[in-house]
Image: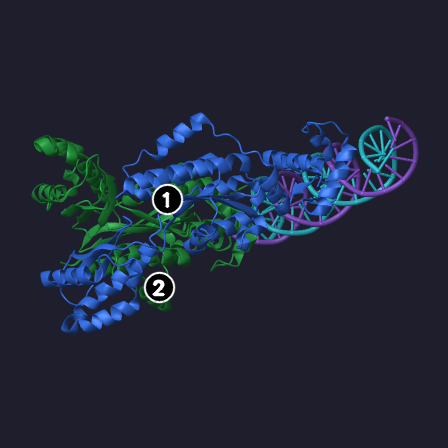
Chain colours: A blue, B green, C cyan, D purple
Amino acid sequence: MTERKQKILAAVVESYIRTGEPVGSKNLMGELDFSVSSATIRNEMADLAEMGYLEQPHTSAGRVPTTLGYRYYIDKLMNKMELNEADCKSITKTVSSGSGDPEQLLEKAGEVIANLTNCAAITTMPAGDKATVRRAEIVPVSNRTAMIVLLTSAGTLKSKACRSDMPITPQTVERFYNVCASHFVGRPLEEIGTVMLQTLVASLGEYALEMSPFFVALADLANDALSSDVLLEGQSNLFNHRELGGNVLELMEFLRKGDPLAKLIAGGTDDVDIKIGTENEYKQLANSSVIISHYDINGERSGALGIIGPTRLNYAKLIPYMQFVSGLVGKILTETLDE
Amino acid sequence: MTERKQKILAAVVESYIRTGEPVGSKNLMGELDFSVSSATIRNEMADLAEMGYLEQPHTSAGRVPTTLGYRYYIDKLMNKMELNEADCKSITKTVSSGSGDPEQLLEKAGEVIANLTNCAAITTMPAGDKATVRRAEIVPVSNRTAMIVLLTSAGTLKSKACRSDMPITPQTVERFYNVCASHFVGRPLEEIGTVMLQTLVASLGEYALEMSPFFVALADLANDALSSDVLLEGQSNLFNHRELGGNVLELMEFLRKGDPLAKLIAGGTDDVDIKIGTENEYKQLANSSVIISHYDINGERSGALGIIGPTRLNYAKLIPYMQFVSGLVGKILTETLDE
DNA sequence: GTTTAGCACTCGAAAACACAGAGTGCTAAA
DNA sequence: TTTAGCACTCTGTGTTTTCGAGTGCTAAAC
C-alpha cells in the first residue's frame, strides 16, 4: 500500500461521501494534491479494486468504496474534523434546556443528533444493571385496581395498573409495602425474579392469593426497569438517503423492534464504535453504517447514543460530534444523579 | 338521483375499494343486478361525474369516486357488513389478555386494529379532563434530584425527574407532601396552572425558593396528564397502499406529531366519525380517510380509537369493526376503573 | 520501469418510438 | 330511452437508439 494509493483511496472515499456518485478517474484528478494523468489513477484504482478496497457498481461506472475501503479510511486515513464552535453552543443549549429528567434529556439529545446528521438517532437510558429497589408500593385507583409503582436507585420510575380479584383494602396496601420494604428495598432489581416471588408468595400464607397479582406485576416492572429503554428519533430522515433504496422499509421495520436495537447499541467496549455495512451483525443493516458513542455516569459506562444511516456517512465530521454529545450527556447526567 | 344511478355509484365505489383500479363501464356490467349495455352505464357514469360523485384520473381511464361520492355511498348506500364471529373472539381474546393496565390495553387494541385493517391505528388514553389529583409527592433520588410523582383519579401516573438548587432534605419532602395534600388532592388537574402556583409559592415564604422547581415540574406533569396521550400503531402499514404514493412520507411526518393527532381524534360528537380525503382539516390527510370510534367509560365519552388509511377503505367492513373494538375497550376500562 | 496519450469497447440512463388495450364520447339506428 | 358501432384519446409497456462517462489495454514517451 503505497502512499499514493492511500491518497487516492482517501480521495475516492471523500468524494463518494460528498456526492454519492461513483467516482471516476478523471474527476478524481482535480481532487488530488499531486498531478498525475487519469490513466495513472486508473491503474492505481484498478489495484485498489483488486485489493478489495473499491468496487464498481457495473463495468463502466466509477468506483465506490467497499466496507473494507471505508474501514481502512476510518482507521488510517481520516482526519477528524474540528467541532464547529457555534454548533457546540447550540447543541449544549438545546440538550441542557430540560428540567433534569433523564428521559427528556436523551430524547432531546436524540433529536439534536438526528437533525444534525440527517440520520436516525438511537439513545439508551442509563443502564439499570446494578440498580437496586428504592421503593415499591401499590396505590389503589379503584375498588379492585391499583397502580404498582417501582422506583429504582438509578432514578427510573416504572408504574403499571394491575387488577386484583379481591377488593383492595388499606391493609393490602400496607402489607404490600411492608413486604417490599423488608424483602426488596436495597436489593438489586435482578433478584425480583419469578423464583424469588414463588417462595415469597408461598410464605405469605392466607394473603398469598390477595397479593400475588401485585407481585407478578412488580416482577414485570423490575424487568422493564432492567431492560434499558431505547429511544429512537428521526427515523424518517432515512428516506432522504436514496442509496438505502427499497431497503428503507425493512430497515425501519427493524428499528421498530426494541430488542435488537438494544443489543446493537450495547456491544462494543471502545469509546466510539463504528460498524460499516456488512460489518453489522444484522443483515437488515448491510447497507447502513452505525456510529455508537457511549456515555459515562460517574466514570461508569452507562448508556450510549448512536446514529444509523447509509454507509456513506461523513465519518470525519460525525464521529467528533457524537463524542461531543455523548460527553455532554454523560456530564449532565452525572450532575443530575450525583449522590 | 335515480335508483339506477345509486346502484351504479355503489358498484363503482365497491369495485374501486376492492381493486384500487379506476373502474370502466364494461367491467361494471358484470357487477350490477340488472342488465344494461356498457353504453348506458357510460351515460349514467358521465352524469354521476357531472354531479361530482365520480372523476377520471385522465380522459381515457375509468372512473374513481370523489370525496363526495364516498360520502354519498357511506351515508345512503352502504350496507354495513356483519362482524365475523371468529374475528370477534380473537380480538376479544387479544385485547383482554393484559393485566389491566390501560396503556397496555390501548396499545394492544391499536395493534389489533392496525393488523386487521392494514392501516395506521391511533388510540387515545382515557381523557383526564375531569380527573382530580389523587396524590402528589417527591421522592429523592440523589442529593439534589428528585422524582415528582403525580397520580390522578383517572388512574394515570406521571413522573419526572427534577433538579433543585438546594439539597433535598426529608423536611422538603414532607413539606411538599403536606402542601399538595392540603391544596391539590381532590382538586381538578386544571387548577394546577401557573397562576395558582404563583400565589402558592408566594405564600410559602422562606421555603419558596426551595420548593418552586418542584411545583413548576408538578404543573408540567398536570399538563401532561391533561393532554390525552395518543398512541400510534402500525404506521408502516401505510407503505402498503401505493395510492398514497409519495405523500406517505409527509403523512408519516404528520403522524409523528402528537398534537394534531390529538385534535384529530378529539373532535366529533357522533359515535363514529368518518372523514374522507379533503374533508379532513389537515392538508396532509387530503388523500387519506380517517375513521374514529369513541369509547365510553361508565357511560361517559372518554377516548377514541381510530384508523388512518387511504380513501378507499373498506368502510362497510371497518366501521362495524371499529365500533366493536371501541365498545370492547370501553367495557374493559369501565370494569377496570369501577369505583 | 513508470507514466501518459490514444483508442476501442462496455454498459447504463435517457430519449424516441411504436403499439396494444382500455376506456371514452358521440352518432345513428332500434 | 337504450344500444351498437366507431373514431379518438390516453397511458403503460416494450423496443430501439443514442449518448456519455468510464474502463482496460497498448504502445509510445519520459
What percent of the width, then of the height, locates residue B68? 40, 43
In front of the other: A177 or B106: A177
Q: Residue at x 31, y 55 (%)?
A: A225
Identify the element where label 1 is drawn. Answer: loop
In front of the other: B121 or B66: B121
How far apart, in angstroms, are the residues tagged by discs 2 and 1? 59 Å
Q: Assess whether mark 1 and mark 2 are in contact (beta carbons under 8 angstroms).
A: no
* Quarter containing the C terminus of chain A: top left
Q: Residue at x 15, y 70 (%)?
A: A207
> Which residue is the site of mark 2?
B83
Left or right of A261 in this view: B230: left
What percent of the width, then of the height, locates residue A104? 32, 41
> Which residue is the site of mark 1?
A299
Q: Amino acid at mark 1?
A: Gly
Q: Amino acid at mark 2?
A: Leu
Task: Specify the farthest residue to the front.
Answer: A299
